[in-house]
Image (cartoon, coloured by chain):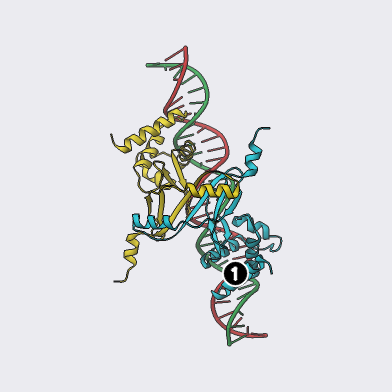
Chain colours: A cyan, B yellow, C green, D red
Amino acid sequence: MSHEHNHLQEALDTLKATGVRITPQRHAILEFLIQSMTHPTADDIYKALEGKFPNMSVATVYNNLRVFREVGLVKELTYGDASSRFDFVTTDHYHVICEECGKIVDFHYPGLDEVEQLASHVTGFKVSHHRMEVYGTCPDCTTSKEVH
Amino acid sequence: MSHEHNHLQEALDTLKATGVRITPQRHAILEFLIQSMTHPTADDIYKALEGKFPNMSVATVYNNLRVFREVGLVKELTYGDASSRFDFVTTDHYHVICEECGKIVDFHYPGLDEVEQLASHVTGFKVSHHRMEVYGTCPDCTTSKEVH
DNA sequence: TTATTATATTATAATCTTTATAAATAGTGT
DNA sequence: ACACTATTTATAAAGATTATAATATAATAA
């Protein structure tokens, strides 16, 4: 049984447990998110599934991404550019983003509890979570920028 | 000579040095950003200055914020919500954001060079910078949520 | 100071992402 | 299979940002 299959099954269980109906569209969106390595936009998902669901509405994609986010299955990433990207939540990881080509690569890091604690102490906030991304140039783009 | 005045003067020098013309609108936008503690949106700035510049266009605000960003005077912050916020760049600091009321508070932290280094090592990226924010509930909102 | 010239501003429209609405459809538990 | 309610669809609307073209203006040099 593959990891992808596991994730999908667990996600469907989560939906059932929270009383969210499992529709073919939701199934397909989840499946796409899980197998996707590209942190797609809502429009990416919409386009990717229009073969299987010629009548699906963009609103359906947005609605379901919101539902998935509320249930904790999906994380919404807002970078500088126009549209949000969506990431199926697996284990805790951060992202490195290539400023040349936009590629997003995961990397794992112990977590920044210390920063949260300091922030909480200094500002008096009750801290719930944080986000962090690293920006730079990916190996491919670094190579193609070199003079030959 | 106040800090605000210093910042403004330095900002104007930066503009002159990079060949960006200093217009009354740019002067006012910079001034507002420097004295503002609220990380305003483009529309906030537009509204704040419409008394002084009744004919200023929204496009002017956006254009100039882009120019300031390109020159390194201003940082654009994209959180989950609809519009970007703009922050005059002074010393390195991070933000805590209240999930109830949206308030943004600065806090200083040594910097996460170690994370950048690890990310670079693991992914092969040439790292240029990172962003991080902490989320939680501010003291005011915590208080007003308590049962009396 | 004035003329020149490129740049900035304005007004407007267009574009793009995301959300709202209402009618039609389809899951789910019985 | 039925009934109930959530979901989907199609469409329009809203909101943020960018593009365009005409006008105005800052910087520079004569």
Give the percent coordinates (x, y) of residue B34. Answer: 36, 41
Q: In this view, does B57 lie to the left or right of A19?
A: left
Label 1 sits on what residue type?
A: Ala
User: Which quadrant, please, contains the N terminus of chain B?
Assistant: top left
Q: Give x and y (percent) for residue B7.
A: 36, 36
Query: In the figure, residue B50 lies in which quadrant?
Result: top left
Q: Circle 1 is placed at which residue position? A: A11
Look at 63% across and 58% down and name the residue there: A45
**Nearer to me, A117 or B131:** A117
Is residue A80 in sight in this rendering? no
Judged from the image, the secondary structure of the residue bearing numbered disc 1 is: helix
Please provide percent x and percent y for residue B100: 39, 61
Of the pair B124 and B77, the residue shown nearer to us: B124
x and y, in percent, of residue A17 in the image: 55, 75
Residue at the image position 59 percent from the left and 55 percent from the top: A41
Report the residue at 36% width, 44% height from top: B48
Residue A8 location, quadrant: bottom right
The answer to whether residue B139 shows anywhere in this view is: yes
